[in-house]
Image (spheres, rainbow, N blue to C red):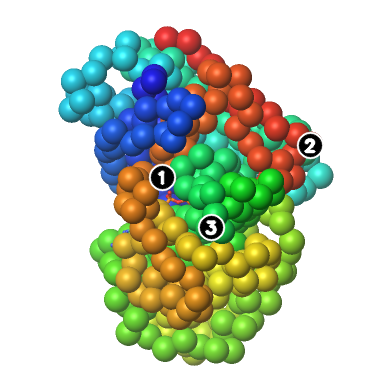
Amino acid sequence: MPLFVGLMSGTSLDGIDAALVRCGEGRPELLDAVGVPMPETLRADLLALCQADAVRFADLARAESAFCRRQAEAVQQLLERNHLDAGAIAAIGSHGQTIEHAPDGEAPYTCQLDNPSLLAELTGCAVVGDFRRRDLAAGGQAAPLAPAFHAALFSDSDEWRAVLNLGGFANLTLLPPGSRALPVTGFDTGPANTLLDAWYARHHDHGHYDADGRWAAAGTVDAALLERLLEDPFFARHPPKSTGREYFHLAWLEAQLSGREAARDVQATLAELTARSIALGVTQTLGPVPATLIPCGGGTHNADLLQRLGRHLPTLTLAGCETFGWHADWLEAGAFAWLAWRRLEGLPGNLPAVTGAAGGRVLGGLYSR
Ligand SMILES: Nc1ncnc2c1ncn2[C@@H]1O[C@H](COP(=O)(O)OP(=O)(O)OP(=O)(O)O)[C@@H](O)[C@H]1O
Ligand SMILES: CC(=O)N[C@H]1[C@@H]2OC[C@@H](O2)[C@@H](O)[C@@H]1O[C@H](C)C(=O)O
């Protein structure tokens, strides 16, 4: 079975993940993965682009080139430590860096910074890029795309399962038992770590996140603030739905603050918001409540967040990705390796029941080696 590299750099802007995956008709197999941190200047440039009202082409091009060179370094590291040359890779699946995501307006768009041409030149590999826009063109949300991959990896013949990505944002996938001919569903539930990271960074000189959720654990949830935040219509909206930094950001939070709250109580409230909005997604929006929940993404390292989730979903068994031969940190990168395989095979990558697209579509453009 051919080898693919998946490249993912998510909304947290913490780094670029590269996963080496063997793909074929059976379950995709993770062979190795590396994560390269985002250099501080590039992180700042990307964050500025995400937050800018107007963007200069020169700034966009400079960030795109630096980002692409960092992606190439990640691929190089992965190939070298596996003693592979570029010819061994059928294709790289490159997600790119989401700068803005606006799938619901009059002129919907989703913007990922990416340069697959340069990446093909730098690595000597074929590259599949631009995964999201075909789904959008077909009337879909363009996100989340990982649910089809979750189904390929984690579906069971008898059990209802759900997969929960705890990245900057959280997305849920519901996997009906294989024996039932039911569609896989999924959607974004709202912020996972993005507000926690932003509030933490505002009140600390060092670090990008609240390690293990210790600061949040030391605070007290402000029940009134939590209820105000949960009143945002996104949480009650029916799928298909997806979201991003352009909707949930510090100004969104600050609009609900009185200014008298202790900073660590706000952090505790934000952690509770993540757990509550996910629990609402599982119990009220998803439909049948799954027996097993498989968490993945950086939030699985946040003990406080997982405890809160467990308290709100006491009947679910939380099963680590490792139980199924994967690692929670590399699932999204793995998804884009698998989506590149789907592209080469001419198979659809999206799930219309998730994104709302008019039908299944082959996703992405191919840039030959
Ligand atoms: N030890 C830890 N303690 C607490 N939080 C952590 C820890 N390690 C990672 N995280 C959280 O996980 C985040 C990164 O998660 P991940 O890499 O899955 O996000 P992403 O892929 O960038 O986002 P998305 O899935 O929305 O695109 C960090 O920003 C941080 O909030
Ligand atoms: C537009 C965009 O980049 N969306 C991301 C983001 O991060 C989590 C959530 O929001 C999810 O919808 C999506 O990423 C994953 C990989 C997806 O498409 O499944």
Few, some or many residues within 10 Å of mark 1 (<14, 14–19, 20+): many
Comparing labels 3 and 2, the label whose residue is closer to the camera: 3
Q: Earlier in the sequence, mark 2 or mark 1?
A: 1
Q: CA distance from mark 3 to mark 1?
A: 21 Å
Rendering coords of residue 33 (x, y %): 29, 37
> How many discs mark residues in the rendered view?
3
User: What kind of residue is marked 2?
Assistant: Ala
Circles 2 and 1, Cβ within 8 Å, touching? The answer is no
Of the pair 94 and 247, the residue shown nearer to us: 94
Q: Secondary structure at mark 2?
A: loop
* Quadrant in the picture for the N terminus: top left
User: What kind of residue is marked 3?
Assistant: Glu
The residue drawn where x is 47% and y is 47% is 154
The residue drawn where x is 66% and y is 50% is 180
Q: Earlier in the sequence, mark 3 or mark 1?
A: 3
Rendering coords of residue 231 (x, y %): 68, 77
Of the pair 72 and 285, the residue shown nearer to us: 285
Rendering coords of residue 341 (x, y %): 49, 24
State the image quarter where residue 110 is shown. top right
State the image quarter where residue 80 is shown. top left
Image disc number at residue 159: 3
Circles 3 and 1, Cβ within 8 Å, touching? The answer is no
Vertical side of 16 occupied by 287: above or below:
below
Of the pair 122 and 132, the residue shown nearer to us: 132
Question: Which residue is outermost to the right?
Answer: 106
Q: Earlier in the sequence, mark 3 or mark 2?
A: 3
User: What kind of residue is marked 1?
Assistant: Leu
The residue that label 1 is drawn on is: 331
Image disc number at residue 358: 2
Circles 3 and 2, Cβ within 8 Å, touching? The answer is no
